Image (tube, coloured by chain):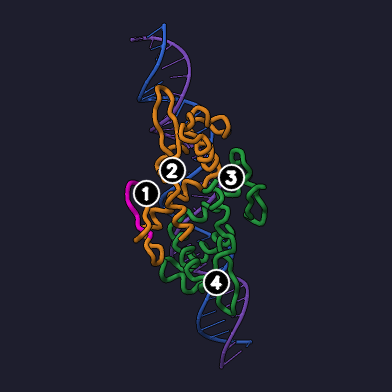
Chain colours: A orange, B green, C purple, D blue
Amino acid sequence: MYHSFMTNAKQVQLGKGPLADVAAASLAPMFAALSDPTRLRLFDLVRRAGNDGICSCDLTEPLDRSQPTISHHLKVLREAGLVESRRDGTWIWYSVAPHALDAVTQFIQR
Amino acid sequence: MYHSFMTNAKQVQLGKGPLADVAAASLAPMFAALSDPTRLRLFDLVRRAGNDGICSCDLTEPLDRSQPTISHHLKVLREAGLVESRRDGTWIWYSVAPHALDAVTQFIQR
DNA sequence: GGTGTATATTGACGGATATCAAAGTATCTA
DNA sequence: TAGATACTTTGATATCCGTCAATATACACC
């Protein structure tokens, strides 16, 4: 029984042998998404917000970056499968995606 | 009692509040070190080698990269505190650094 | 429709990075 | 000391990334 995880809507098997080329190619973007200080703090803020999530408008100021920059980082986190967003009128709420860090955890505990 | 970890020979407190600027700046390079597919496989190979470690000369071929490129990646992993190296004559042996992934683990389990 | 607020996209710029070939350094052995 | 092997550093190149200002889009309300 292999452990597995979803990345970019494609299931990846970690398997038992040396880390496969395909698995590495799927894992790397998740680490890359967390490799920027601003994005780390961004993800942390979203995670601390819990199930309700946090409005994008409340993320710009504490990180001292322009609105487009925060928007860009949120997109990176979203495309890496780490956060989700839902629109509520004019606002957009971000929350941690279910099983967001499973792939990372499995690699670390390998 | 705070959790803590060592990065770049400097102790960093994760604390309880939102991820601090300093903590993010120390964590990001660890994720960055793991954000490249070649480096991920490289780290995996070193980890699989266990306590004995693995010779650098045995890492070039399986990853299909030039020898200088592998040397470069090993340097990145070493400077991120993920692997250690010791010389044995002409050869250099790499092994996983103790508590290599503690910082990452603590952030994930935050 | 028009106005205001929230968020996304575009375009540009400076800096980082993955890669290789070539050259340099270190160590062993003869 | 000379040659061979293992590894590192340098220099060059192409690509990627973080950032912002400017612009565009989406939505609510009047």
* Disc 4 versus disc 3: nearer the observer: 4
Which of C3/B25 is in front?
Answer: B25
Residue located beneath label 4 in the image:
B51
Disc 3 and disc 1: Cα gap in Å? 24 Å
Are marks 2 and 3 in one subunit?
no
Are marks 4 and 3 in one subunit?
yes
Disc 2 and disc 4: Cα gap in Å? 33 Å
Are marks 1 and 2 in one subunit?
yes
Bounds of the magenta span?
A8-14
Q: Name the side, left or right, on which A49 lies relative to B5.
A: left
* Disc 2: CA contacts within 10 A as few (<14), some (14-19) or many (>=20): many
The chain holding disc 2 is A
Q: Quadrant of the N terminus of chain A?
A: bottom left
Residue located beneath label 3 in the image:
B24
Residue located beneath label 2 in the image:
A82
Residue located beneath label 1 in the image:
A7
Query: How many dots with numbers?
Result: 4
User: What kind of element bears circle 1?
Assistant: strand
Residue A67 in the image, given as x and y percentages of width and height: 50, 30
Q: Residue at x 51, y 52 (%)?
A: B32
Which of B62/A24 is in front?
Answer: A24
Q: Name the side, left or right, on which B86 lies relative to A33.
A: right
* Disc 2 versus disc 3: nearer the observer: 2
Q: Is residue A50 above or below residue B93?
A: above
Q: Earlier along the polypeptide chain: callout 1 or callout 2? A: 1
Are marks 2 and 4 in one subunit?
no
* Disc 3: CA contacts within 10 A as few (<14), some (14-19) or many (>=20): many
User: What kind of element bears circle 2?
Assistant: loop
| Three-letter amino acid code of the residue under disc 1 | Thr
